[in-house]
Structures are given as C-alpha cells and as structure tokens.
Amino acid sequence: MVISGFRLPMAAALLIWMVIWEIAGHTDAGFILPPLSRIVWRVIEIVPTPSFLDALLITGRSFLLGNVIAIGVGVPLGMVMGRSIIADRLLLPWVNLFLSAPLSALVPVIMVLFGLGETTIVLTVVLFSVWIIVLNTRAGVRGISLSLVEMARSFGASRWQAFSRIYLWAALPEILAGIRLGMIRAVKGVVIGQLLVSVVGFGTLFEIYQSHFLMEHFWALLLVLFAFAFTLNEGLARLERSVGYYAASR
C-alpha cells in the first residue's frame, strides 16, 4: 500500500482496523463489540483452560477427519471428471449445484440419516469442503498438455502410472488450491455442524458465551478461529506457491 509516495507494509491496514475496533469498543457499541484489547486478554485467559482444550480436541478431530475424507474423495473424483467426458457431464451439474447451494439447510437431512453424533459433524465438514476440491482438481487435469499424456502412452505407461506420474503432479497447483479453499470452508462446516447437530466442542463454548451474553469471551473464541483460518490459508498458499513451477512446466 502506497500513500503519498510512502510504501506502507501490508500489516498497516490491519493495524488501522485494530485501532478503529479499539476506539469503537469504548463507545456505546462496546456492549456488543468490546474493545480489542480486552478481547485479546480474554484469548490469553481462555486458551489454557481445560474446557477450551477439550473443545479444541473434539473440534480438531472432526475437522481433520472430515478434510481427509473430502480430499480422498474430491481429488480422484475431480481427476475422473477431468479425463472422462461422460463422467464430467453426469457429475458437473451436481457439483456446481452443491457448491452454490446453502449447505447449512442440508445439515438437518444428514442429522436425520446419521443421528446426532460425531459422524454427522464429520459429514458436514465433508459437505462444505469436497465440492471446491473436485472443481479445482478437474480444472487442473483439464489443463494438462496432451503432449504429456501422449508421451506417457508412447512409453507404455499404465493407467496408474499415468495417474501417479503425470496427472497428479501436473495438476498439483490446482489441487493444492482446491484443498486450501476446501479447508477454509471446512472451518465453517465444523462450527456449523457443532452448533446445529450436537452442541459439542467449540459449539458448546459458543452456546455458553451467547446464552450468558459473555461478549468478550464470544469474540475471543471467534478471534481464535479467524487466526486459525488465516494461518491455515497462508501456510497452504505458501505451499501452493512452492510447487507453482509444475504449472509452468506443463
């Protein structure tokens, strides 16, 4: 960001909004939006508590398991859609439909089918994250140069060898981009699942803070989730950039 010829660091905009938040917290809006300094203090206070660590364990388990399933289903499905015209025409309308649909409305359906346990929360995470992984993988596979595929065939490569040595590596930047976006959506999915399905994990803390109108604690928990999502996004984006040369070489 450049102002009057002076280049300001990217964190300058964040610092400006932090100052605005702090000022707003000392006005009448502080009833709903407490000062940022007090929220940060609450973060330091609640993170070491047993209730937070237990909620983190429950939420993290559902989040990781849901993402593993979403990646395990989304990447192969996207590759099949990218290489098969029939599969693409059959599945692409449904993938686009679920990607644009209000997925929160489908959570009660999963609840009826699988009950109120952790299985439903994990499936909610999968529902939120898998579709963008499928679409990005499909786009990456469809962007592979035909010369690479023809070269593999000319050397007698089997389907598995073509998949593991050509398609996977050449489409890796798009696959990682889909995983990054899918994990960000999975953060929303796990919280929504815990709030709507069964009040466990972070859903329990949100319910307690909201019902008792503990706004500092409520915003502190939100701040932790925002920080986690931001860190996750930046880490995966850096990994994505590190393999960007595959996109150029293909």
Image: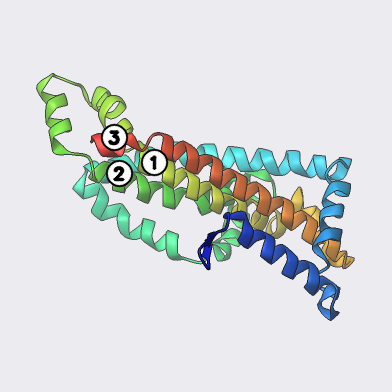
Mark 2, Cα crowd under 10 Å, few <14 / some 14-19 / many 20+, is many
Mark 3 or mark 2: name the one nearer the start of the chain. Answer: 2
Residue positioned 65% across, 58% down in the render: 192
| In contact (CB < 8 Å): disc 3 and disc 2 | yes
Residue at numbered disc 1? 175
Residue at numbered disc 2? 140
Residue positioned 63% across, 44% down in the render: 119
Name the secondary structure under disc 2.
helix
Image coordinates of residue 58 in percent, x first then y, are: 73, 41
* Mark-to-mark CA distance, 1 and 3: 10 Å
| In contact (CB < 8 Å): disc 1 and disc 2 | yes
Mark 3, Cα crowd under 10 Å, few <14 / some 14-19 / many 20+, is many
Using the rendered view, name the quadrant where residue 198 is placed.
bottom right
* Mark-to-mark CA distance, 3 and 2: 8 Å
Image coordinates of residue 113 in percent, x first then y, are: 58, 53
Q: Amino acid at mark 2?
A: Gly
Image coordinates of residue 250 in percent, x first then y, are: 23, 36
